[in-house]
Image (tube, rainbow, N blue to C red):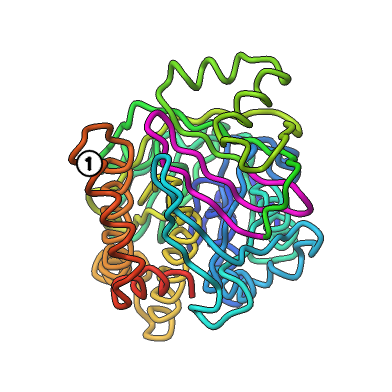
């Protein structure tokens, strides 16, 4: 990996990426076969970026996402022993035993998708990154300001450095500071709930089936990991999640086991519990002159449909293709007219999933009688009407 020199004539780049999270690094990896000079800027230490801590999150990848990771030459870095497959996904409502079922045979694949811990993906994205000579990393620095003119975007960093780039790409989370500095606002949905994620071992086998249990006071999802382990995701109001976070391990195990109605038999916490606020965001526009948003900075999804990172990968794939097309056409990659192609395509891909997911969450967490009756009907409707079900299955391909 090249290093940024403090000399003024070395501080020019084609693309500056704000944020060294998985989306920012994956985007940089996608530019490896170009002659573009790229810099990633992040306030984290190099150790935090190269060896990320476990954060409790398990990432469910679609087949298309795996295809993208293979294109980025990242997939081969991920140890096979850390990858689990998902063969089926089942959605249940309340205490009903009826479930909406998605099976791998319906998409003519060996599985619906793949499950990998988030920190494993991040760690191996970095392993790929350090072998790329056209990518620089500036760590322990925050972007304080971005000023755009006809030719460049000028960035001022907290370490005193100033750099110029033809294009700035923000990948700094759904609460993006750079997005705000650029005067771009976002639609924000605060569900007034929190999500607890953890890994648990259980007595009964999961048979590589993912479950979504829409209870009346909480939503629980299970993601099948290796052996008899699953990623457990509990979404509830903050009072309940605070209570669950404060429990000792013995009482927590008993509480989760009971809330699943002994569905998996005895359950035991492995490692820590992690809590995250349930806030989704959808940016009002994804681009401006010499500026683009990717990943959660563009669209921050609710985890209930497990499509957040899949959508992030789809978005960066679109932007990479538009940049490469502009290079072939000898066009300026920072022009808003070029970037709007990316915006239009991402909006077309993201808006239906985002709106549908938020609607599902609102419907399936409501305790009023009409909502309860409606959601039972929807499960049966999707299960029995093939064109409707196929729409959901197409996302998994």
Q: Is-magenta flag for residue 128?
A: no
Q: Is the magenta stretch mostly helix, strand or loop?
A: strand
The magenta span reads 208-231
Q: Residue at x 32, y 77 (%)?
A: 386
Q: In this view, does 313 lie to the left or right of 48?
A: left
**Total labels drawn:** 1
In this view, the residue in front, 97 or 117, is: 97
| Above or below 385: residue 343 | above
Q: In this view, does 168 lie to the left or right of 81?
A: left
- Say which residue label 1 marks: 371
Location of residue 112 in the rendering, given as x and y in whole percent from the top left corner: 56, 69
The answer, for residue 296, to whether it is visible in the render is no
Locate residue 128: give its quadrant: bottom right
The answer, for residue 37, to whether it is visible in the render is yes
Q: Is residue 333 left or right of residue 20?
A: left
Crowding at dot 1, Cα within 10 Å, few <14 / some 14-19 / many 20+, comes out as some
| Above or below 229: residue 288 | below
Location of residue 392 in the rendering, given as x and y in whole percent from the top left corner: 37, 68
In this view, the residue in front, 366 or 324, is: 366
Q: Is-magenta flag for residue 226?
A: yes
Locate residue 214: give its quadrant: top left
């Amino acid at each position: 990996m090249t290093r940024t020199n403090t000399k003024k004539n070395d501080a020019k780049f084609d693309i500056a990426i704000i944020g060294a999270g998985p989306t920012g690094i994956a985007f940089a990896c996608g530019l490896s076969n170009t002659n573009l000079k790229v810099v990633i800027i992040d306030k984290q230490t190099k150790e935090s970026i190269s060896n990320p801590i476990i954060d409790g999150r398990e990432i469910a990848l679609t087949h298309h996402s795996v295809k993208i990771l293979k294109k980025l030459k990242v997939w081969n870095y991920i140890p096979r022993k850390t990858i689990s497959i998902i063969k089926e996904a089942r959605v249940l409502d309340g205490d009903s035993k009826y479930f909406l079922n998605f099976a791998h045979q319906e998409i003519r694949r060996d599985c619906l998708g793949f499950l990998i811990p988030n920190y494993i993906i991040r760690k191996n994205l970095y392993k790929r990154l350090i072998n790329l000579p056209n990518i620089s990393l500036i760590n322990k620095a925050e972007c304080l300001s971005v000023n755009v003119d006809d030719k460049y975007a000028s960035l001022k960093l907290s370490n005193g450095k100033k750099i110029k780039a033809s294009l700035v790409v923000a990948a700094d989370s759904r609460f993006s500071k750079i997005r705000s500095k650029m005067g771009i606002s976002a639609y924000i949905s605060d569900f007034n709930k929190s999500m607890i994620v953890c890994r648990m071992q259980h007595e009964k086998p999961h048979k590589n089936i993912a479950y979504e249990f829409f209870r009346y006071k909480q939503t629980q999802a299970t993601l099948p990991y290796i052996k008899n382990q699953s990623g457990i995701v509990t979404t509830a109001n903050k009072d309940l999640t605070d209570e669950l976070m404060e429990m000792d391990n013995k009482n927590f195990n008993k509480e989760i086991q009971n809330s699943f109605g002994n569905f998996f038999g005895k359950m035991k916490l492995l490692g820590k519990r992690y809590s995250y606020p349930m806030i989704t965001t959808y940016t009002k526009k994804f681009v401006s002159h010499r500026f683009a948003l990717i990943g959660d900075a563009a669209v921050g999804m609710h985890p209930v449909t497990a499509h957040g990172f899949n959508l992030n990968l789809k978005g960066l794939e679109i932007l990479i293709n538009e940049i490469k097309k502009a290079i072939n056409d000898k066009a300026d990659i920072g022009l808003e007219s070029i970037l709007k192609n990316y915006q239009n395509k991402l909006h077309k891909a993201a808006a239906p999933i985002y709106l549908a997911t938020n609607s599902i969450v609102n419907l399936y967490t409501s305790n009023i009688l009409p909502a309860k009756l409606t959601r039972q009907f929807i499960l049966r409707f999707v299960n029995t009407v093939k064109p409707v079900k196929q729409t959901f299955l197409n996302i998994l391909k």
